[in-house]
Image (spheres, rainbow, N blue to C red):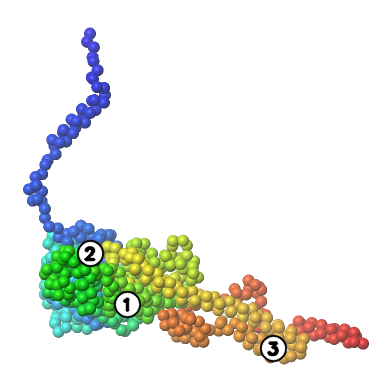
């Protein structure tokens, strides 16, 4: 009989052997690529190809948001074109639903039009535009928006973009094109003059863009309707006509007939550049000497300041080629550029000019809110220009309170950047955080911890800048810089103080009206009683008491003029041009509710006629006669 022997090493050894065998099989089946094969697979990635695969970075996350982003980019371009051309904007937005998830978006404006040779690149090439390199306030910045919208339409429907443009003294030109994402260049499908299209432009110039795309239309928050409503608030000089998928025409008329002032282009500020940017500017400058480079390529640097910077840099690097303002730019290397950069950081330089900014203005913001928000109190505040990273910016805030606004919900925050509404990523935006950080309890509003105030309140915050620091390419939220949030908070506090003054005054007026109603309830009774006791004329007593009650409760008689200001001045708000009070929207004080809680329903006794004799008067006379008799008896 044979006896089986157990394998040496136990069960653990068997598992190790199996693992080694499996590892050998995997090693044998894996192929190895050579350096040459890997190099052959390398190729350049087109920027349009990158954004086609990462379209969520541009705001095309889902069909509903894509529809909004397309209209937003087209309207922004139309407003910029009209303002640069010196034309009061008249913009028509038409949203035609072809199928359940397919729409045709058409945006037409009355701007100066686009010359034929520029149409291809503007609508068929990403990162092409006139605003990226300018230090000047504008809605568009990157040269991506409208061409990305056309690319999204091409990807989802396969249909090209249709552009009709008309300039003065030339017939309209119609172009249909699509973007070649692999090469980031336009491909023209049709190109022809179209005199029949002149009918779309009654003023003789303008542009019309049509994009067919997949989308989803839904009203409410973060919708096309809300975007156009907020755009009308921030741009009261523009006229919008909106035709929604239900074929309903909604008009947003102008609130004012004046164009905003034209923003001026400025040069970069020395404090706003980094070392690498400074080196590139030195390499590309047309100036031959360092002093001329500083004066010609930067703002706020004159001859004296340029000389100071050069001398400071020379002291920082004594062994370098820096010899003052006459140093040749061609002889500057990395060490010289670094010394100059340190000198710039250590030297005090005047803040950049602010004529490159065009804020909405307090009056325009109030006009926009009055047009769209049904409230009773409006206030606005504009902060002085400030600077972040060398870029000038300005913060404006307006609030609306009361009226027909809901008092049971949290305050509504309207965020704007360069007059463009920001509808997404609210919690990530510096504007929203500034509203939450403000202590609204100090101004008479309820506010839970770490939340928005509760009550009938709308808060509008606008940031104007030559370069708005958005959190992403989709331009949906403002980055959280300390300098920006501080200015927002100060502007909110200024408006909050005015709101607090108004609420306290309104509360006093309400209390005075309640006091007067109580006085008037018993003035008639007091007058008749006094007549019974003293024999004086009840009518004269009634008139005197009425006059005294009016004097003691005079604040209840405040009258407001057409601007909502108190005619007889009793408050700091009366001389404030940044405050509007709508008298018709203020809720009336209900006399019945104010007095019934204290004295019950006694409406019939409110103003009793002093000439009418009552049983109380007879009783008072009898009491006076008895009192006279007792007095005469004591005398005897």
Residue 209 in view in this figure: no
Q: Nearer the viewer, mark 1 or mark 3?
A: 1
Determine the CA span between mark 2 and mark 3: 80 Å
Q: Nearer the viewer, mark 1 or mark 2?
A: 1
Q: Quadrant of the C terminus?
A: bottom right
Would you say the residues marked 1 and 2 are in contact, meaning their CB atoms lie under 8 Å apart? no
Label 1 CA crowd tier, 10 Å (few <14, some 14–19, many 20+): many
Of the two numbered discs 1 and 3 on the same chain, state the one appearing first in sequence.
Answer: 1
Image coords of residue 12 (percent x, y): 26, 26
Residue 10 shows up from this direction? yes
> Who comes first in sequence, dot 2 or dot 3?
2
Residue 351 percent across, percent down from the top left: 29, 75
Side of 103 where 29 appears, left or right: left
Left/right placement of residue 126 relative to residue 381 reads: left
Dots 2 and 3: beta carbons under 8 Å?
no
Label 1 vs label 2: CA separation? Answer: 35 Å
The residue drawn where x is 49% and y is 74% is 500
Q: Looking at the image, which residue sits at the far right?
A: 636
Q: Earlier in the sequence, mark 1 or mark 2?
A: 2
Q: Which residue is mark 3?
A: 541
Mark in the foreground, 2 or 3: 3
Q: Residues within 10 Å of mark 2 (few under 14, many from 20)?
A: many
Q: Secondary structure at mark 2?
A: strand
Spatial separation of the CA atoms under disc 1 and disc 3: 60 Å
- Badge 3 density bin: few <14, some 14–19, many ≥20, Cα 10 Å: some
Quadrant of the rendered image containing residue 519: bottom right
Residue identified by numbered label 1: 359
């Amino acid at each position: 009989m044979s006896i089986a022997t157990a394998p040496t090493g136990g069960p653990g050894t068997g598992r190790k052997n199996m693992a080694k065998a499996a590892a050998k099989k995997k090693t044998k089946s894996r192929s190895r690529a050579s350096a040459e094969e890997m190099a052959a697979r390398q190729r350049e990635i087109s920027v349009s190809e990158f954004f086609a695969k990462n379209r969520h970075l541009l705001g095309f996350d889902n069909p509903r948001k894509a529809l909004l982003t397309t209209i937003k980019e087209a309207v922004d371009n139309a407003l910029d074109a009209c303002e640069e051309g010196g034309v009061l904007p008249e913009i028509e937005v038409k949203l035609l639903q072809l199928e359940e998830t397919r729409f045709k978006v058409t945006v037409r404006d009355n701007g100066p039009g686009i010359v034929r040779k520029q149409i291809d690149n503007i609508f068929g090439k990403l990162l092409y535009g006139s605003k990226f390199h300018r230090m000047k306030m504008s809605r568009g910045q990157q040269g991506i928006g409208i061409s990305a919208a056309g690319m999204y339409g091409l990807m989802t429907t396969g249909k090209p973009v249709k552009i009709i443009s008309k300039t003065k003294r030339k017939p309209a030109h119609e172009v249909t094109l699509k973007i070649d994402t692999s090469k980031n260049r336009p491909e023209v499908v049709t190109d022809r003059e179209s005199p029949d299209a002149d009918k779309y432009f009654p003023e003789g110039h303008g542009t019309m863009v049509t994009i067919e795309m997949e989308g989803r239309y839904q009203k409410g928050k973060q919708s096309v309707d809300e975007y156009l409503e907020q755009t009308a608030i921030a741009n009261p000089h523009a006229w919008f006509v909106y035709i929604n998928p239900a074929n309903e025409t909604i008009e947003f008329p102008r609130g004012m007939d004046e164009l905003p002032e034209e923003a001026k282009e400025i040069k970069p500020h020395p404090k706003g550049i980094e070392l690498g940017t400074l080196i590139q500017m030195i390499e590309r400058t047309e100036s031959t000497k360092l002093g001329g480079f500083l004066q010609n390529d930067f703002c706020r640097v004159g001859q004296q300041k340029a000389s100071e910077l050069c001398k400071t840099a020379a002291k920082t690097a004594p062994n370098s080629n820096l010899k003052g303002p006459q140093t040749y730019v061609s002889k500057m290397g990395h060490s010289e550029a670094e010394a100059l950069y340190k000198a710039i950081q250590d030297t005090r330089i005047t803040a950049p000019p602010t004529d490159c900014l065009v804020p909405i203005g307090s009056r325009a913001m109030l006009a926009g809110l009055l047009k769209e928000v049904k409230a009773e109190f409006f206030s606005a505040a504009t902060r002085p220009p400030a600077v972040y990273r060398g870029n000038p910016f300005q913060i404006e805030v307006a609030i609306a309170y009361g009226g027909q606004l809901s008092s049971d919900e949290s305050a509504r925050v309207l965020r704007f950047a360069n007059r463009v509404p920001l509808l997404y990523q609210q919690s990530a935006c510096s504007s929203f955080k500034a509203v939450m950080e403000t202590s609204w309890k100090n101004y008479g509003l309820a506010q839970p911890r770490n939340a928005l105030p509760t009550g009938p309140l709308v808060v509008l915050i606008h940031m104007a800048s030559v370069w708005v620091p958005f959190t992403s390419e989709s331009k949906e939220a403002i980055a959280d810089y300390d300098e920006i949030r501080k200015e927002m908070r100060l502007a909110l506090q200024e408006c909050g103080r005015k709101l607090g003054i108004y609420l306290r005054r309104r509360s006093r007026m309400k209390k005075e009206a309640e006091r007067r109603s109580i006085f008037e309830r018993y003035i008639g009774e007091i007058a008749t009683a006094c007549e019974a006791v003293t024999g004086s004329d009840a009518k004269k007593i009634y008139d005197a008491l009425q006059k005294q009650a009016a004097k003691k409760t005079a604040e209840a008689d405040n009258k407001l003029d057409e601007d909502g200001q108190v005619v007889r001045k009793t408050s700091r708000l009366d001389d404030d041009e940044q405050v509007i009070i709508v008298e018709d929207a203020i809720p009336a004080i209900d006399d019945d509710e104010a007095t019934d809680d204290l004295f019950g329903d006694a409406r019939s006794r409110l103003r009793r006629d002093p000439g009418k004799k009552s049983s109380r008067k007879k009783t008072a006379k009898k009491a006076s006669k008895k009192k006279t008799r007792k007095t005469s008896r004591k005398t005897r």
